[in-house]
Image: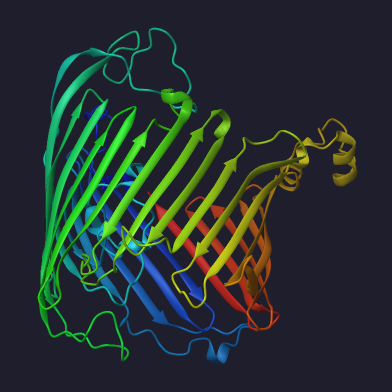
Amino acid sequence: MTLALLWPAPLFGETPEPSASLTPPFAWSLLWSGAWEDKKDLTQRGDLRLSLPRQGLTLRSEILDKEPAEFHWPWEHSSVFARSFDGSGAAVQGGLYHNPTGTRLLYGALDDWGLPARLRNTWQHSAPFAENRKPSMADLKTAPASSADPEFYLYLGSPHLSFPLRKADPPDKTFDEPSGEAGDENATGNKDGEAAELVGLRGFGSARIGQSDRPTFGGGLEGWFGGKVNVNLEGFYTGWTLPAKKSSAWFSESPPLPERDFRLYGLGLLTDTRLFGLSSDWAWSETFAWGRDFYGALGLRIGRAGTAALKGWQLSLAVDKAGPRFTGSDGSGPGEGFRTGTKIEWRGRGGRLFRANTTLRSPGLEEPLNRISAGLYYRLPPGQGPFSVNRFSLSADWDERDREKPLDGLEGAMGFSIRPRAFPPWFIEFLLGEPEPGKDAAGGFLTDFWLSPLHFQASASLKGIRQDTDPPSYSFYSFKAGGDLSWSPRSFQFRLGLAYGEQNDKEGLWDFSFSAGVRVKPGRFGLKIASADFPGNWAYTLSWRLEKK
């Protein structure tokens, strides 16, 4: 089974199911992954799934374990383990999934996304662009989390209720999709590129209850029209008693607070079409002894990158605001703020991608700006020559949240590719030696191994403290520059990284890392060697991922 089984049913219509005679009545998969870091912890994950494909059911059992288990390098047999394993760090969790509707019943530590996640630590997320929205859902964590308590989670999704309305043109294709032949039969069974236009509706609801008595409820409706228009409306509620809070300093934005009741109501709306998308989030919180306040967000998309609409161009706008006494879905206050975001994106043939974005932020709607960031990114199609530039990026940041130490920064990166196979034949023969009679210099396992392409990325960042002078002057704050070289011959992967950085008056440090991995039929094995103060302290990490599908 694959992770696709964990997602709800598709947005537009139902996916045709394979013939029952070709679908096995029973399937299973087993995953074991982990990492063992020198002088730290051994982290493991086991994931067993039993499924009935014809019924669309999957039973999942997962074990997450994190134990202090030192090993010493070079190997010392007398003290390999610092302590024996007692299973105190293990967590057992599981769930039952119904694939066609996305319905699931889970118990364990959970990861969530969608509306509840967007209302948590709002300023730590990117600007609320419409195309970045995800449906509200939760699933089991795949990494141990000491601070996460096990919870029960129930998600109920209704089947897609849809009926054909009339025939219409098929949806837009991306530039990377091959064009079909005339008269080909599409997924709906119609000829000559016609698709059955559907009108449909589905509903969903969820409940989440943990040991810490923090109930969370959500639900909504989703409707679609002919694969061209999708509308999603969802609501969210949570509430519990927040613990007492003490001030961390003599002067604090929030005073000491007793235990207090907290309630949060949220509403999200998404309208998505070929030419535009519109999203909106609204939340209202009520906290005893603290107050009531709101959070609001709007996102607008014009065009769709990579499609024929507007020749592949896309313009995205976003704005959000939080009141000073708004409390997020995790019970903490993100603080007052106002933010706007703009993004222009274009996707072309061959994987071309251009993106330009800006973000402006201030403490309030009528307050002066205290942070501005902007970025450019361009990805080129794979080159055919020996050397090629495949991507570059540039970003700038102006941060005045700390009035005593305003920081301005620049960061840039550029990626290169080296293709040994594109070198002249005489150079390949010089590099590998003269081939045996009857064999091509560019053939064979070892030749293919050594002629695999190499990828190199160079990056640099510089930050300075702006002085209050005219014109502005800067004092040094931090600098970092480095490079990363990767090589993936056959089933092997190698990566080498080296960087140098300085900050304030601290001594500069070299950062070195080397990793090697090999892909085998059941999975992957890897080894990483790193030193954050090269050539000082060293860290060694063994990792693995084995899977039976």
Q: Is residue 124 above or below residue 169?
A: below
Q: Is residue 371 visible?
A: yes
Residue 511 in the figure: left or right of residue 189: right
- Quadrant assignment, res 245: bottom left
Where is residue 401 drawn, in percent x and y?
Answer: 43, 70
**Which of the pair 104/194 is nearer the observer?**
194
Q: Is residue 144 above or below residue 68?
A: above
Residue furthest out toward the front: 470
Q: Is residue 206 visible?
A: no
**Which of the pair 488/278 is nearer the observer?**
278
**Which of the pair 486/33 is nearer the observer?**
486
* Residue lying at 35% horizontally and 42% vertically, measured from the top left: 131
Residue 98 in the figure: left or right of residue 80: left
**Which of the pair 423/2 is nearer the observer?**
423
Q: How is the image coloured?
A: rainbow
Q: How many marks?
A: 0
Q: Is residue 175 above or below residue 124?
A: above
* Residue lying at 37% horizontally and 63% vertically, measured from the top left: 124
Where is residue 307 drawn, in percent x and y?
Answer: 43, 27
Where is residue 478 drawn, in percent x and y?
Answer: 62, 73
- Quadrant assignment, res 227: top left
Where is residue 398 drawn, in percent x and y?
Answer: 52, 62
